[in-house]
Image: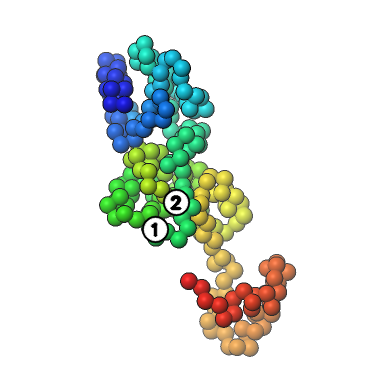
């Protein structure tokens, strides 16, 4: 693997192209080598594979450049776009989020898509499970990002840092079915529903009579349960 990277570096040096390889991203799958590099200010993915009997793992990526390093090795260069991020998660499973379960975790929440490598380095020192993709729909709108953008940025960062200890993705402050679908399709593994539009902020000040009236006025048909069901689900129950 080191020889392959050295050949690639020398090839580009001979072409007078200024590149930086993220050494922590280098990974082998079968007879194919994956890694990330930066050329000028743009991060790109590189796949190096044998000229003879090439593995098919790279066939669904969309390349922007390809060529021969020598008689034995070919290379392809890819932009870090949506299609390639989606295929990356299929080929390298450590770049896709996991269901967190009851594992102790910490949410990071990279709001602009640039800070995740630093977050990964921090959690490595702490030994906690990170929720790397963590952003509310409101924040996405304000930063002109989509759920897919958030997921893709995290996947590329995990690949860049060679982080294989797992991470989760929390779609935060969800208020509409449309937002839930968008985050589900992007691959989020945790969903935080925001019911604040339906919360009566004055409830703490109501007397018992008013509370009973408000309770009776709840939209029971929309809730798909009746009063008895609600009592059975929550009354005198302990939740941890």
240 to 171, vertically: above or below: below
Going by the image, does 11 lie left or right of 230? left
- Please indicate, yes or no, whether residue 1 appears anywhere in the rendered image: yes
Please provide percent x and percent y for residue 212: 65, 84
Q: Quadrant of the N terminus?
A: top left
83 to 72, vertically: above or below: below
Give the class, few, some or many, for how many residues have Cα within 10 Å of label 2's Cα (few <14, many ≥20).
many
Q: Are marks 2 and 1 in contact (CB under 8 Å)?
A: yes
Q: Residue at x 64, y 77 (%)?
A: 232
Q: Which residue is mark 1?
A: 105
Please provide percent x and percent y for residue 234: 59, 76
68 to 232, vertically: above or below: above
Query: Foreground residue, 177 or 165?
Result: 165
Of the image marks 2 and 1, the number of the one nearer the N terminus: 1
- Please indicate, yes or no, whether residue 139 appears anywhere in the rendered image: no
Query: Foreground residue, 52 or 60?
Result: 52
Q: Secondary structure at mark 2?
A: strand
Q: Which residue is mark 2?
A: 168
Q: Secondary structure at mark 1?
A: strand
Q: Residue furthest top?
A: 71
Q: Residue at x 46, y 47 (%)?
A: 97
């Amino acid at each position: 693997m080191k020889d392959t990277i050295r050949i690639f570096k020398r090839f580009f040096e001979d072409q007078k192209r200024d590149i930086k390889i993220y050494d922590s991203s280098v990974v082998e799958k079968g007879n194919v080598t994956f890694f990330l590099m930066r050329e000028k200010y743009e991060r790109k993915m590189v796949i190096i594979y044998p000229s003879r009997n090439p593995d098919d793992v790279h066939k669904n990526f969309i390349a922007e450049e390809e060529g021969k390093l020598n008689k034995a090795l070919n290379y392809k260069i890819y932009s870090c776009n949506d299609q390639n991020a989606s295929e990356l998660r299929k080929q390298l499973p450590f770049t896709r989020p996991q269901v967190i379960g009851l594992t102790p975790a910490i949410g990071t929440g990279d709001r602009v898509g640039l800070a995740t490598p630093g977050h990964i380095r921090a959690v490595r020192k702490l030994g906690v499970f990170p929720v790397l993709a963590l952003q509310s729909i409101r924040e996405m709108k304000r930063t002109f990002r989509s759920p897919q953008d958030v997921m893709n940025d995290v996947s590329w960062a995990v690949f860049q840092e060679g982080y294989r200890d797992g991470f989760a993705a929390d779609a935060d402050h969800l208020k509409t079915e449309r937002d839930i679908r968008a985050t589900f399709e992007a691959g989020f593994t945790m969903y935080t529903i925001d019911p604040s539009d339906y919360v009566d902020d004055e409830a703490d000040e109501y007397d018992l009579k008013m509370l009973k009236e408000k309770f009776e006025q709840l939209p029971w048909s929309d809730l798909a349960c009746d009063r008895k069901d609600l009592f059975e689900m929550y009354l005198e129950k302990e939740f941890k």
